[in-house]
Image (cartoon, rainbow, N blue to C red):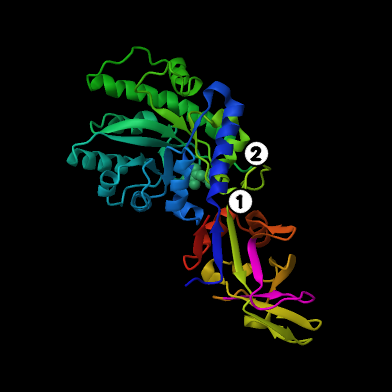
Amino acid sequence: MIRPTVARIDLDALKSNYRRIVAYLAAEAGDRTPGVIAVVKANAYGHGAGQVALALEEAGADLVACADIEEGHALREAGVGAEILVFGALSVSDLDGLFDCRLTPTISTPGAARAVQAAAKRYNQRLRYHLKIDTGMNRLGFRFDNVRRSLPELLASPNLELAAIYTHFATADDPASPLFNEQRLRFERALVDVEDVDRGARRNGGEDVVPGGSANSAVERFVLAPGGSSRPERSPYIHAANSAAMLRDSRVWYDRVRPGLLLYGIVPPPLASTLSLTPIMTLTSRIVAVKGVRTGEGVGYGVKFSAEIPTTIAIVPAGYADGLDLRLAGRGSVLIRGRRAPIVGSVCMDMLIADVTGLDVSPGDEVVIIGSQGDDRIDVREMAAQIGTIPYEILCRIGSRIERLYR
Ligand SMILES: *Cc1c(COP(=O)(O)O)cnc(C)c1O
C-alpha cells in the first residue's frame, strides 16, 4: 500500500553531488585538498538517514555527522560502517550509545567532558573526540577567549583523545556580515591556545613532547599544513565550514569541510552556486478530485479564497501533516500538466487545493509539489522564499507519513 503523495530520492544524484563537491575541493585546493564530513543529521535533512548515508559511503564518504547519539544508533542499525561524528551536546544523553555504536562525540562543554571521561573510564577505553570551540555563535562550544582556563582538565583526561578541533559559523550565508571573518580569526587564535594547553597537559602526563609551543608553530601545525605529511602524528585535525562557508571562502576549508545542504543538491540562499548540483528530492502527488466553484463562492477553511470568475479547483492529498506549510496558501503553486496551479484557500491537515482553471485536469493527474514537470520546476529555495523560511526547514519538515522511494 502506498499513498499518492510520495518523495522520490535520487541516490545517484546524491552520489554525484558528493563527487562533485570532492572534485571542486580538489580543483580549488590542489595538494591540500580537504576531506569531507557528510552531514546527515535530522534524518538526512528529511531524505532518510540510513539510505543516504549508505549511498554516501558508496561514493567514498568515510565520515558522516549526525545530531545526537540516537541518530548515530539509527545509522549503525542501517548498516553504516563509516566513522560517525555526533554534533550535539551530550550532557543529558545516555552515553552508553557512544561505545555500543562506536560513535565519535563532540565535546563542547566542561560537563560533557567530565561525563564522557567517566564513561570512557568505565568502558576502559580511550575515546577519540572532537573539541568544539565557540567563536561567536554563542551556542555550543568552549568560548574562544577562555580556552586556557577551560581546557586543561579536558585535555588531561586520561581516557579521551583529541582527534579534531572545530567551530561553526553563524553568518556564513550572509556576505555582508563581518562576523564570518572575525570567527575565522578567533578560531585560528584559539587553536594556538589549545595547542599550548595540550602541550602542557601532555607534559604533565609524562609524555614526550616536542619542545616549542610558540604561536607560530601552532598555527603552522594546525592551520598552515592541514593534512600535510609533516604534521606530528598526534596532531588533531581542523574543520569549520558548512555549505555556505565552503562556497564562500577556501581559507576555512582546513582539513575537512562539513557540507549538509549541498549534498542534497541545494545551495544555501542567497549564495549563487559555483558548482553544479542536482536536487535529489522530488515530492509528487495525484489529484483526487476536481470541481467547479461559482463566482463569489469561497474555498477551504476560513474561505480565504473566493472565486472572482467561474473557477476549477483540484484537491491534492497533501497537507500540513505532510509538512506543507499553511503559508503556502495564496503564495505557492504546484505543477499540474506542466503549468503552475496556485495553491488557494487553505492548506489543510491532509489536503491542499489548487486553482486549475483553464487546465484540462482529471483525478489521477500527477501533481508536482517539489521538482520539475514539463519545462517548469519548483525548487525548495523558491518555496522557502515564498513563505519566508529557509530550504532546510522545508526539507526537514516533510512528514513521516510520506513514503520515501529510493532510486
Ligand atoms: C548542520 C551542520 C552543518 C551543515 O550545514 P549546511 O548548512 O547544511 O551545510 C555543518 N556543521 C554543523 C556543526 C552543523 O550543525
Q: Secondary structure at mark 1?
A: loop
In the rendered view, tell whether residue 310 sits above or below residue 72. below
In the rendered view, tell whether residue 177 sits above or below residue 279. above
Q: Is residue 348 left or right of residue 208?
A: right
Q: Residue lying at the far top in this picture: please name it.
A: 211
Rendered residue at 32%/40% (across/down): 110
Q: Is residue 149 visible?
A: yes
Q: Between residues 237 and 371, which one lies in front from this camera angle?
A: 371
Q: Is residue 146 visible?
A: no
In the rendered view, tell whether residue 275 sits above or below residue 74. above
Q: Between residues 187 and 93, which one lies in front from this camera angle?
A: 93
Rendered residue at 73%/85% (across/down): 292
Q: Amino acid at mark 2?
A: Leu
Q: Position of residue 280 (x, y in %)?
A: 58, 52
For residue 319, which quarter of the picture?
bottom right
358 magenta-colored: yes
**Over which residues does the magenta segment extend?**
351-370
Whole-angstrom CA distance, mark 1 to mark 2, is: 13 Å
In the rendered view, tell whether residue 71 sits above or below residue 105. below
Q: Is residue 105 left or right of residue 242?
A: left
Q: Position of residue 323 (x, y in %)?
A: 54, 66
Rendered residue at 26%/47% (across/down): 100
The residue beneath circle 2 is 275
The residue beneath circle 1 is 279
Q: Amino acid at mark 1?
A: Pro
Q: Between residues 114 and 262, which one lies in front from this camera angle?
A: 262
